[in-house]
Structures are given as structure tokens and as C-alpha cells.
Amino acid sequence: MIKTIIVIDGMGGGVGSQLVAKLRESFGKSPEIIALGTNATATERMIKAGADRGATGENAIRVSVGRGGLILGPIGIVIPDSLMGEITPEMARAILAAPGERILLPLQQDHFLIVGIETMPLGKIMERAIELAREKMGL
């Protein structure tokens, strides 16, 4: 049984805060949600959206990402130098190496394109991510 969900985001934390809010709405108080931000603004927004606790920066992400049975965030969290350079190679490696299962939102960025994925509004992408999280949680 998954006891902890990790949500990772950077920049302004908009995607992460929406994910946290939808997870909290869907799951209630359990499981624990940990917000990991590449910067303090992202972390703060995710905590305000309902994360139980959070941490900020490269070392916090490298150390804490392994605590989650599920890891959610935009696809850029596993691509070095994405999110306008906020994702370091060390962060991307740690996220990819973490034992938890990753649910990544296919959001386009300036320096890469995702081919073969249906374009849909962010709200629909988030709904699907929450559905997948519920499936992984056995709900």
C-alpha cells in the first residue's frame, strides 16, 4: 500500500499546486503528500494547496524523492535543464532512480517536443493523472 505521494514542481509551482489540490480532494487526508520544489515559491504554493510538508532545492529532492510510492509532476522533472534550467542533472537522475512509480504530465517546453501524445487541456491531463494515481493506490 502506498503511504506517501511526492509531487515535484518548479518555476511558479502552478502545476504542482494544482496536482496537490486534486490529490487532496481525491484522497482526503491519507496518504501523506510531500511537496518538493526546485524553488521556495513552488514549494510554498504546493503546501498552501494541501501538501502535508515540503522541502526545497536539489539536495532536498535528491534525499526525499525516494520516500514516495508515487511521484507526480510535469515530464520536465526527469529532463536535465528543463523548467527553465531549474532541473539539474542530479535532480533528474535522482527522480528517475527513485523506487516509486512516476506519473508524468506531458507538458511541452521550449527545448523539447513530445511527439505522438494527444494534445489536451491541462485540466484533462490532471484528471487522467489523478485517475492513474487512484489505480496505483488500488482505489
Image (spheres, rainbow, N blue to C red):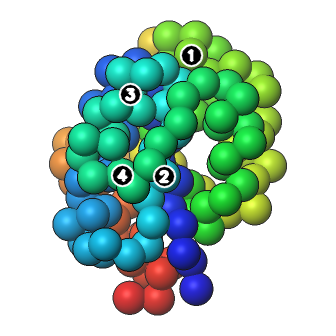
| Spatial CA span between label 2 and label 3 | 12 Å
Instruction: For marks 4 and 2, give the CA distance.
Output: 6 Å
Q: Quadrant of residue 78?
A: top right
Which is in the foreground here, disc 2 or disc 1?
Answer: 2
In contact (CB < 8 Å): disc 4 and disc 2: yes
Q: Nearer the viewer, mark 1 or mark 4?
A: 4
Residue receiving disc 4: 51
Q: Which residue is mark 1?
A: 86
Crowd class of label 2 (few under 14; some 14 to 19; many from 20; radius 10 Å): many
Distance CA(mark 3)–CA(mark 1): 11 Å
Looking at the image, is mark 1 or mark 4 earlier in the sequence? 4
**Residue type beneath disc 1:** Glu
Residue 104, placed above or below residue 90: below
Q: Secondary structure at mark 4?
A: loop
Q: Quick check: 3 above or below 103?
A: below
Q: What percent of the width, then of the height, locates residue 89?
A: 76, 23
The disc label shown at residue 34, or none: 2
Work out whether residue 104 or residue 61 is closer to the camera in this orientation and state it: 61
Q: Is residue 109 above or below residue 91?
A: above
How far is the residue under mark 4 from the one under mark 3?
A: 12 Å
Q: Residue at x 48, y 81 (%)?
A: 137
Residue at 67 percent of width and 25 percent of height: 58
Residue 101, x across and y down, in percent: 63, 63
Check disc 2 and give the amino acid type.
Ile
Residue that badge 3 annotates: 42
- Earlier-in-chain disc, 4 versus 3: 3
The residue type indicated by label 4 comes to Ala
Mark 4 / mark 2, whichever is N-terminal: 2
* Residue lying furthest front: 53
